[in-house]
Image (cartoon, rainbow, N blue to C red):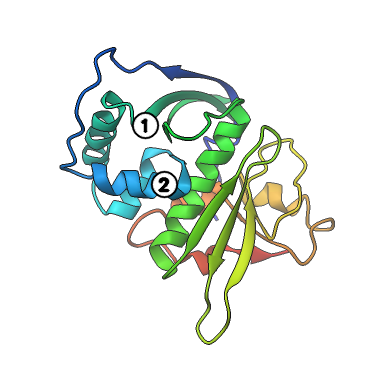
Amino acid sequence: MKPGDSVFAKGMSMTTLKAPVEIESVDYGGYSYQIVQLLAEAEAFPVLPLTYLLECNKKAVEMSLMSLWHARIVNRLLLWTRSKSLTHVCKLWVATDVSMPKTPDEACRLAALGLFYAKAKKEIPGLEWKLYRNTKSTRAEMTLQPPGKGKLKLTVAAPRRDEQPGEADIYIFPTPGEAQQFAASLKGKRFTSDLLLLENMNPAGVDINQLIYEF
């Protein structure tokens, strides 16, 4: 595993950018329509998982997101985060028909869940995804149907740095090293990390089953 840290490890502050006063019509050219469909499940995304899902470049995704922002279909959030000793400014795009994150850490959880969703949605046929959110515990429930078996429901949580993990089946920690701190208390549970997801958010990356480990 490569050394490093996640830009979504710990939220510091955030601000929601205001769209222009005049509402523009939506140009459903480009990737706007597909992005709206994906946001209906995931609610929020950084840009990278959208480029992975849509198999296109960052500029094309950002142009479609800006069109949706001008039409008040998405909100544009600037998020200041900290990884190790570095500060980052990240963009998070949130559907306007859901609640905005109340804290920077909640925004970071949504970003991490967006990374996981993108890998799972791309690779697991028929995946269903539902978010359950509050300021202390943002979780997703994913439903899948393994071949020859009944439907399986799994909860996914994304505890951020210095947070205690709540109840879930799969955890997304900022880094693999942080996951190992909870090996004793979460024995039998499964985990992945922002770093592993980010490193494999490309056509050559390994599939999601190879990124999930058991404590």
* Mark seen at residue 40: 2
Residue at the spot 60% in from the left edge and 33% down from the top edge: 106
Whether residue 49 is visible to the viewer of this picture, yes or no, is no
User: Is the C-beta separation of discs 2 and 1 under 8 Å?
Assistant: no
- Position of 36 with respect to 161 (left or right) is left
Q: Which residue is denoted by mark 1 in the rendering?
A: 74
Residue at the spot 52% in from the left edge and 28% down from the top edge: 100
The one of 192 and 1 positioned closer to us in this rendering: 192
In which quarter of the view is residue 141 placed?
Answer: bottom right
User: How many numbered marks have been drawn onto this rendered protein structure?
Assistant: 2
Crowd class of label 2 (few under 14; some 14 to 19; many from 20; radius 10 Å)? some
Q: Locate the C terminus by quadrant.
A: bottom right
Whether residue 43 is visible to the viewer of this picture, yes or no, is yes
- x, y percent for residue 159: 67, 43
The amino acid pointed to by label 1 is: Val
In which quarter of the view is residue 211 placed?
Answer: bottom right
- x, y percent for residue 187: 80, 63
* Mark seen at residue 34: none
Question: Which badge, 2 or 1, is on the more N-terminal residue?
Answer: 2
- Position of 203 with respect to 206 (left or right) is left
Q: CA distance from mark 2 to mark 1?
A: 11 Å
The amino acid pointed to by label 2 is: Ala
The one of 61 and 195 positioned closer to us in this rendering: 61
Residue at the spot 45% in from the left edge and 19% down from the top edge: 16
